[in-house]
Image (tube, grey):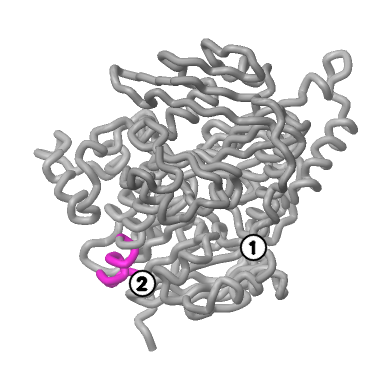
Amino acid sequence: MADLLLQMEGVSKRYPGNGVQAVDGASLQVARGEIRAIVGENGAGKTTLMHIVTGVVGADTGSVTVCGRTLVTGDPAAARAAGVVMSYQHPRLDRSLTVLENLFLGDEPRRLGILFNRRRAYDRIRAVARDLPKRLVTRPLARLSSGQVRMVSLVAALLRLPTDRAGVLILDEPTEATTPEEADRIFQIIRDSAAAGHAVVFITHRLPEVGRVAHTVTVLRGGRIVGTYAADAGAATLAAAMVGSSEGEDTLHPPPAAGTHEPGPVRLRFERLTIERFGRSLVSDVSFSVRGGEVIGLTGIRENGIEAMEGLLAGKLSHTSGRFELDGRTVSDPTPNKLRSLGMRYVPTDRLLRGASVDSSVSENLIALKRRHLQRAGLFDAATVTDFAASLQRRFGIDAALNVPLWQLSGGNIQKVILSRELEGDPHMLVICEPSWGLDFRTRRRIISQVRRTAQAGAAVIVISTDIDEVIDLADRVLVLYDGRIVADVPASEASRQSIGRAMAGALAVGEPGAR
């Protein structure tokens, strides 16, 4: 028998507060040196199953054995002592600290038992992530891109893996909001960890990733394990297992194109826009416009201006020079309230920190933009609130009770709550960042359809994403930022993954279609 590092037998977990059977009799075995992918639709129980392994969640029934130790579930310290570490879907890091401080929080190497030993800290980082730039390590976490934050979370987990024996490394959606280059580095770290003798389990909704890095893949549906396959089983086979029918193969394909209707008037315009911060140019001389009914995909490696454009469109940054217009009105000093008053809706990259109140209920999050409309004489009408929230719940397929706190939901259902709130009411303009982050293929199809319908209703839509396939699927035009400038502008129907990738890297040849 293979040297098993993780064994789960008959594990179940039910949440009595909302009646959800998150995991139902799951049994799983992962061997030393094995890379196991875990896939399933949003709410299938993937994250809960791994939270039971880490001790974050206690199981109702069943047993968990790690590296030969049978654990009492619900005890994170015991799981860590057994050799379990996890990089979470929403990284558990402190944005007020530097990367270095986050990496060693609670586990600081000391000199003379008192002083922080930076030399030893850097040596430990190089041992597990040789390619992590030293300049990145000294930065405040708040200044990092989403992909960089995810890499930091992964490195923090690697630093806590046992060095004298095998351990279990768990990664929840490790490549979300990462560039193709960042994803490649993460895949190599996964391979290196398995080669060092650890067992690696990673949750993903990106089925093509499974064949690239995993040895085997386990499918969950409705809290139950429905099968374990070779990683080369194919996306169609895995999708069918995830949804329980041959419907899976059909839903792998994106919805039909937005259509051939003529776009409306210009709703958003940038002319020679420049954004500077701390004496450094983040965006330089950017000009483009978006018409009603049009979807523009804005992509690039995140340090090349993507975050600055998101910050401007969110009202978090101001432009240094140039012109910013919404529906013909000049916006000189954008703020979140001002942009919303002009009809802008915004779905941020960082859903939990900027897009939601995780301690509030699903219903409270859904009505956040409609509170005044749902009040009478300053008081909420309970029936009206429930009807409004329930209508969004049905429209977007939110799989959760309206009265439970948002933090109890899966990452995909949190995403649907935020999207449904922002897409309700036919907005004039929509900025949506990394729209399929954390979503399974069927929910991704639903979101693409909703975004396109929002555009067809007359909205100007900007999709900001580092996922090349996503912007090609969603957009009418794809704009690529490199070094703060637009270096490519091409119709999505003429774009290729290769040409967009070259533009993102600053290597698009002069005269190549779309090059500026």
Residue 386: give x, y in percent of width and height: 84, 36
Q: According to the image, label 2 marks what residue?
A: 67
Q: Residue at x 44, y 53 (%)?
A: 175
Given residues 348 and 193, the one toward you in this image is 348
The amino acid type found where label 1 is placed reads: His
Q: Is residue 150 left or right of residue 324?
A: left
Residue 456: give x, y in percent of width and height: 74, 39
Magenta segment boundaries in residue numbering: 189-198
- Residue that sits furthest to the bottom in the current view: 1
**Which class describes the residues within 10 Å of circle 1: few (<14), some (14-19), or many (20+)?**
few
Q: Residue at x 27, y 66 (%)?
A: 192
Compared with residue 310, is residue 189 higher up or lower down, i.e. above or below?
A: below
Q: Secondary structure at mark 2?
A: loop
Determine if the magenta segment contains residue 57.
no
Main SS class of the magenta portion in the image: helix
Disc 1 and disc 2 in contact, CB within 8 angstroms: no
The amino acid type found where label 2 is placed reads: Cys
Say which of marks 1 and 2 sits in front.
1
Q: First in sequence, mark 1 or 2: give its number.
A: 2
Compared with residue 87, is residue 478 higher up or lower down, i.e. above or below?
A: above
Image quarter where the C terminus lies is top left
Q: Residue at x 41, y 69 (%)?
A: 212
Q: According to the image, label 1 marks what residue?
A: 253
Given residues 225 and 497, the one toward you in this image is 497
Q: Is residue 140 visible?
A: yes
Q: Secondary structure at mark 1?
A: loop
